Amino acid sequence: MFRSLAPTRFDDFVQNFEGTPSGRIFLSGQGRSGLVAQMAAMRFMHLGRDAHFVGEATAPSVRSGDVLTIVSGSGRTPVSVGFAQVARSEGATVLLVTHQEQSPLRDLADGCIVLPAAQSEQFGGSLFEQSALVLLDAVVLALMPALDDAPRTMLYNHTNLQ
């Protein structure tokens, strides 16, 4: 599935996370896409990044220099479109992970990865959500070499209250 993604497109997507002026990363999605966004937010936090899932009680307001990454298969979810509009009006970078070539969110996004996961025998878009999780985990893997000791940092930041 990921073979169809141009390597430069992935690299360009990753660069949005490398030098965020504020260092803050917000992730959002609705339904199962939201669960993927929550898991990705956790991985970015493990990496030592200031990461938040939109809607959590401790998530701050989005501002200029922040990155908002939205996971939306359809690219049309009204709540997500609203979040993208607010983020853009505040000067944040808006990124999208979707399976739609054309959509309202794609029009609002500064960067986008289109996953070829629209057609599947799995129920309810599961292939898209699984692919989005792997993609966002690959972004974290791509960012790891910038840390002196990424595995140690990630282990240190991993929860110890389980």
Image: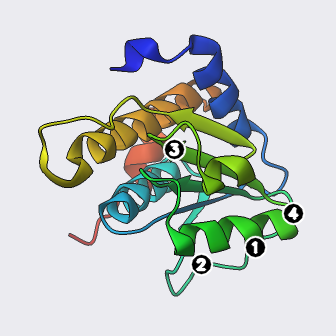
Quarter-of-image position of residue 18 = top right
**SS for dot 4:** loop
Q: Is residue 118 above or below residue 116?
A: below
Mark 3–mark 1 contact, CB under 8 Å? Answer: no
Q: Residue at x 69, y 26 (%)?
A: 12
- Do residues under tags 1 and 4 come within 8 Å of each other at their CB atoms? no
Give the foreground label among 1 and 4: 1
Residue 70 position, x and y percent, is 55, 56
Three-letter amino acid code at the position of disc 3: Val
* Nearest to N terminus: mark 3 or mark 1: 1
Q: Residues within 10 Å of mark 4 (few under 14, many from 20)?
A: some
Label 1, label 2: how far apart the Cα atoms are? 15 Å
Give the mark nearer the N terminus: 3 vs 4.
4
**Spatial distance from mark 3 to mark 4, Cα to Cα?**
21 Å
Name the disc covering residue 86, or none: 1
Can you say whether 110 is above or below 32 in the image? above
Q: Is residue 97 left or right of residue 118?
A: right
Tag nearer the camera, 2 or 3? 3
Amino acid type shown at disc 2 = Ala
Image-based side of 80 in relation to 87, left or right = left
| Residue indicated by mark 2 | 59
Reading the image, the residue beneath label 3 is: 97
Picture residue at 65% right of the left edge, 71% below the top: 83
- In the displayed structure, 78 sits above or below 35; it is below
Circle 3 packing at 10 Å, graded few (<14), some (14-19), many (20+), is many
Label 2 – label 3 distance at C-alpha? 21 Å
- Residue 156, given in percent of the width and then of the height, sits at 42, 52
Mark 1, other Cα within 10 Å: few <14 / some 14–19 / many ≥20: some
Secondary structure at numbered mark 1: helix
Q: Earlier in the sequence, mark 1 or mark 4?
A: 4
**Percent position (x, y) of residue 113?**
55, 34
Identify residue for label 4: 64
